[in-house]
């Protein structure tokens, strides 16, 4: 029996320390084909008893912005079991290889899908939190855009802090990232990251095109500010405009 692309991706998600086979790396995949495969990957997780906890919108910030093409913004899923709260401890042996990225995390009071406008996004955001995305490096840097999308854009999970309310000039914030008390970088929203509400709007409409949606109580992340590789120790993101801070420890 031949091994499918999905089977190979599933194996890497279960065994992130294994090298991606060359036959997988050589597989030609468009971004849309990768998006469809990613949904099948999600379905396999759900078949294993996992629950869907939210979504990410990719390629919105920094060096990755437009890296797959001008305006191309693929989505990724977040498993509910991998959504943690402030000060969580994560095991490096489980994460294996990757990094943490400060991101803004949004919560919702009702669903958003096809036909969403920016105003809809603003109205249905119920909470805004400081957050981290936990990215797991399962593919080498030479992986194609389509394969990276199929692999769920490297997502492993997220961590989020307290709700800061929705009355925040979210597109004006800056974030400072710390590792073991040492400042790594300070990143300002302007000219670095897409408008957050536009990203939510784009995500909702892309999900709608696949028969999916941002659902009530889902968490959504919209793009990276600072980032640093995995290492044992304490990580903290301090967000301006009274958004607050979020911390995690890798053990």
Image (cartoon, grey):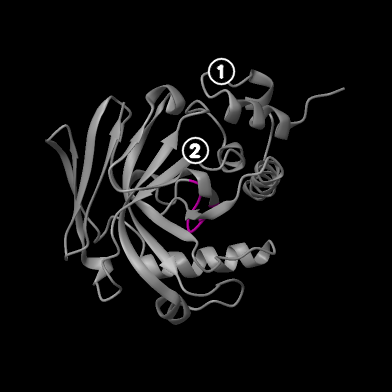
Q: Is residue 218 left or right of residue 89?
A: right
Q: Residue 76 appears at what percent x and percent y?
A: 54, 50
Q: Which of these two is toward me, 102 or 193?
A: 102
Q: Is residue 232 visible?
A: yes
Q: At x 38% / y 27%, what residue is drawn?
A: 91
Q: Secondary structure at mark 2?
A: loop
Q: Residue 137 appears at what percent x and percent y?
A: 46, 30
On-image quarter of the C terminus:
top left
Q: Secondary structure at mark 1?
A: loop
Q: Which of these two is toward me, 67 or 51?
A: 51
Q: Is residue 202 left or right of residue 209?
A: left
Q: Is residue 74 visible?
A: no
Residue that badge 1 annotates = 19
- Mark 2 Cα shell of 10 Å, populated few (<14), some (14-19), many (≥20): many
Examine the rendered structure and indicate whether residue 14 appears above or below residue 132: above
Q: Is residue 90 left or right of residue 87?
A: right
On-image quarter of the N terminus:
top right
Q: Which of these two is toward me, 226 or 26?
A: 226
Q: At x 40% / y 57%, what residue is drawn?
A: 222
Q: Residue 119 appears at what percent x and percent y?
A: 43, 81
Q: Is residue 100 magenta?
A: no
Residue 10 sits in which quadrant?
A: top right
On residue 154, the disc is 2
Q: How many marks?
A: 2
Q: Main secondary structure of the magenta part?
A: loop
Q: Residue 191 appears at what percent x and percent y?
A: 26, 59
- Residue stretch rendered in magenta on the structure: 68-75
For marks 2 and 1, the one nearer the N-term is 1
- Mark 1 Cα shell of 10 Å, populated few (<14), some (14-19), many (≥20): few
Q: Residue furthest left?
A: 182
C-alpha span from label 2 to label 1: 14 Å
Asked if the residue under mark 1 is in contact with the one under mark 2, i.e. CB atoms within 8 Å, the reply is no
């Amino acid at each position: 029996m031949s091994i499918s692309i999905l089977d190979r991706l599933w194996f890497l998600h279960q065994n992130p320390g294994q090298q991606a086979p060359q036959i997988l790396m050589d597989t030609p995949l468009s971004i849309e084909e990768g998006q469809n495969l990613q949904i099948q990957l999600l379905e396999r997780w759900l078949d294993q008893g996992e629950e869907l906890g939210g979504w990410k919108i990719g390629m919105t910030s920094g060096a990755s912005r437009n890296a797959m093409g001008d305006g191309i913004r693929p989505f990724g899923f977040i498993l509910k079991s991998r959504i943690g709260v402030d000060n969580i401890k994560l095991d490096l042996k489980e994460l294996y290889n990757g990094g943490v990225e400060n991101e803004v995390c949004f919560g919702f009071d009702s669903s958003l899908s096809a036909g969403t406008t920016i105003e809809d996004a603003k109205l249905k955001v119920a909470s805004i939190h400081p957050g981290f995305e936990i990215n797991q490096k399962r593919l080498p840097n030479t992986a194609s855009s389509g394969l990276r999308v199929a692999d769920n854009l490297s997502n492993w999970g997220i961590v989020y802090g307290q709700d800061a309310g929705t009355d925040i000039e979210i597109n004006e914030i800056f974030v400072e990232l710390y590792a073991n008390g040492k400042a790594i970088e300070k990143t300002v929203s302007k000219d670095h990251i897409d408008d957050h509400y536009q990203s939510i709007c784009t995500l909702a409409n892309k999900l709608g095109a696949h028969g999916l949606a941002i659902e009530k109580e889902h968490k959504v992340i919209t793009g990276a500010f600072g980032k640093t590789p995995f290492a044992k120790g304490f990580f903290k993101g301090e967000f301006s405009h009274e958004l607050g801070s979020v911390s995690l420890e890798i053990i």
